Amino acid sequence: MPIPPHAIAVAQATQSAAAQSATAQTRLIAGPGTGKSSSIEQRVCWLLDQGIPPGSIYAVSFTRASAKDLKERILSYCDAHGHGAVGSQVRVSTLHSLALRTLRAAGLLQRFPADPLVLDQWELETIFDAEFGETSTIASKLRREEIRRYHEAFWSTGVYLPPNYLPPDPPINQMEAGAFIAYHGARTQAYSCVLPGEIVRQCVQEVNAGTINPVQLLHIQHLIVDEFQDLNPMDLEFIHGLANQGVTLFAAGDDDQSIYSFRFANPAGIQRIPQLYPAAGLHQLNECFRCMPEVLAAADRLIISFPSPNRVPKQSVSLYAQCNPPVTGAVHRWRFGTGVGESQGIAASCAALIAAGTAPRDILILLSNSRALEREIAIRLEGANVPFTSASTETFLDTKAGRFILSLLRIICDGNDYIAHRTLLGIRAGVGIRTSNAVCQLVIDNLLNYRDIFYQILPVGIFTGRSLAALNAARAVCGQIAGWQSDDLLGVRVADLHAMIAAAISPPDAQAWQDFVAPLPQEMTLQELRDFIWSNNDEQQVTILQTVYTRVGQPVPQAQVLPQRVRLMTMHGAKGLSARVVFIPGLEETILPGARRAPYPGLVLEAARLLYVSITRARAACVISYASRRLVNGQSQNQQASRFAAHLNGPFIARVGGLQAVEINAMQAHINQI
């Protein structure tokens, strides 16, 4: 890396000063690529150096994926700095998991038949919403989701119809809301599950009622909160409740990167810390290791032009500016005549960059509206023979075979995983949502336990016809895996799993399983296989593979490293990622901010933050573009440049193609300096 050592040392000293803050509350504002994760890692080690018991240190992050990544980083850092023996005792999880841990410690999860699991998006749509539609006769998939979102808004904020909730048209009526409440209570009990958002609210309710004290239950002394700007009002109430009971709070994040209002997050959460805690230590990381100066300048110009109310002022600087000679990076701003021309230009540019030596994985294409942009770009990438993966690309987990295998593995690793049993029942060929719903309703109506019907003798006359046939098929599969263990090796069980898929779903699905599992090491345990399939991204999968191959004393085969493909994904999906080159197409008023956001000034400002986050994914170069005409619903329509286009630190230039040879060479020169 060409960044001078003295510049790195100055930036790291700022990180260390934040990590070693001794105040009861600390706020760390960390811009993109400034080393927030490094400060958190140092914070944990510094606390351990002070003699703080590792089990009293808790760190939470926004998603299961980010929490998993944070845990691995903390473990690695502790191991490298003399705390390897205790680093694993530091509690790292999502906030949902922390709330669940609190309720479990208080004995309040006994209201469920087993520790409840938070439903993932597939389970929400395919099981929970679908069965709600069946019981309530609400046929519209969209309407079922709108009704659920109405209640999630309440769980996340504590009030119905909160200010940042956009009600559907028509609004949710009393009958729909009541039908959901009646369905939700019994169904989550039967399946021993919870929905995103509700578990934190349950915890806050108990705290406010004086029935539990999380600090005493969990022995928390220090709480580190990553991505603080992504917390919703109920999350904040939970966190501040802990701080008010004496827990030392370290809040890290960036109000400029608050982009989850649809989950009811707001940048004000991190902005207001000095008002809530006048004695709080206030630290800020401004030195950017990631973005080269031109990239950072474009992003900063945008966010300064569209600041959120009470924005925390920043003095962001790229450390690449201190190189000798300076490394500037590049931002290209392009205007195309048509959307097709834009897609062709992006595809040609990707092909040229790859031919010049840029690894495909070092290229990101970020979309603010997948429906409007993804299909055309994907067609052109295929035409240019550019290897790529997209957000809509089906993974093995998205298939019936994938969900069937995952449900088996989850049951093997945790026999009390109720929702995995429900998946196993309903994923079988010929078993529809009506039959699955009928089975659960019979369980509720006849005072039965849902898991028991897969293992115990069935009561006479309750289950008949299709329900009995589906249940008996699932019971047979549970019987087949009854003696399996989570540490069984894949090589021992792979043939049996193949036969089960062929029998339960279809031979083609069994072949898809065979194709998926063929490259995986036979020494992988079933628990590792579960985690591999359940991973949020391929980086996590590679980490699991590295663990397996390290255990057996072999290097990771080249075929198992991260796939070399251009990543075509949503702007929200790219949060936390980076690439040497980033393309951002479709910078048009109808796409970003878009018609949905345009009537709401706060959402327009959030759209600017979303673009800011996207630009700062780029390390060396960013290409931002829009089209003057685009196909919309099959018709060519005139488009206007987004209001953000005039605030990106330079003019947009008319283009008819992709990057030219001289531009490719210059870009490669920047990339080579990383």
Image (tube, rainbow, N blue to C red):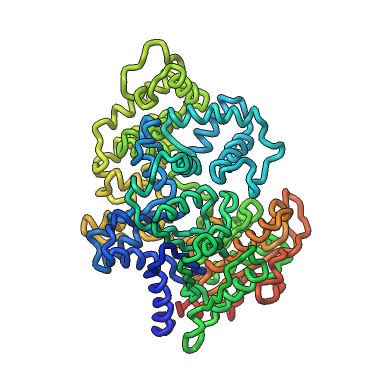
- Taking the image as drawn, is residue 356 in sight? no
x 39%, y 51%: residue: 93
Residue 174 at x, y percent in the picture: 65, 30
Residue 499: quadrant of the picture: top left
Q: In this view, does 246 lie to the left or right of 277?
A: left
Residue 74 is situated, as x and y percent measured from the top left of the image, at 34, 61
Left or right: 146, with 498 as reference point: right
| Identity of the residue drawn at 42% across and 14% down | 462
User: In the current view of this chain or complex, which residue is farthest to the right?
Assistant: 638
Residue occupying the far bottom of the picture: 324
Total numbered badges shown on the rendered structure: 0
Task: Please state if 609 lies on the left or on the right of 545 as rendered.
Answer: right
- Residue shown at 39% from the left, 56% from the top: 247
Quarter of the image with the C terminus in it: bottom left
Q: Which of 542 and 60 is in front in this view?
A: 60
Rendered image quadrant of residue 281 = bottom left
Q: In this view, does 16 lie above or below 6?
A: above
Q: Which residue is painted at 54% across and 75% down in the image? A: 316
Image quarter in which the N terminus is found: bottom left
Quick check: 468 above or below 647? above
Residue 350 in sight from this viewpoint: yes
Residue 386, position as x, y percentages in the image: 53, 62
For the residue pair 74 and 45, the one nearer the viewer reads as: 45
| Relative vertical location of residue 103 with respect to residue 21 in this rendering, above or below | above
Q: Percent from the top left, x then y, of residue 607?
A: 64, 59
Q: Is 514 rendered above or below residue 231?
A: above
Nearer to us in this view, 77 or 333:
77
Most foreground residue, 650 or 302 = 302
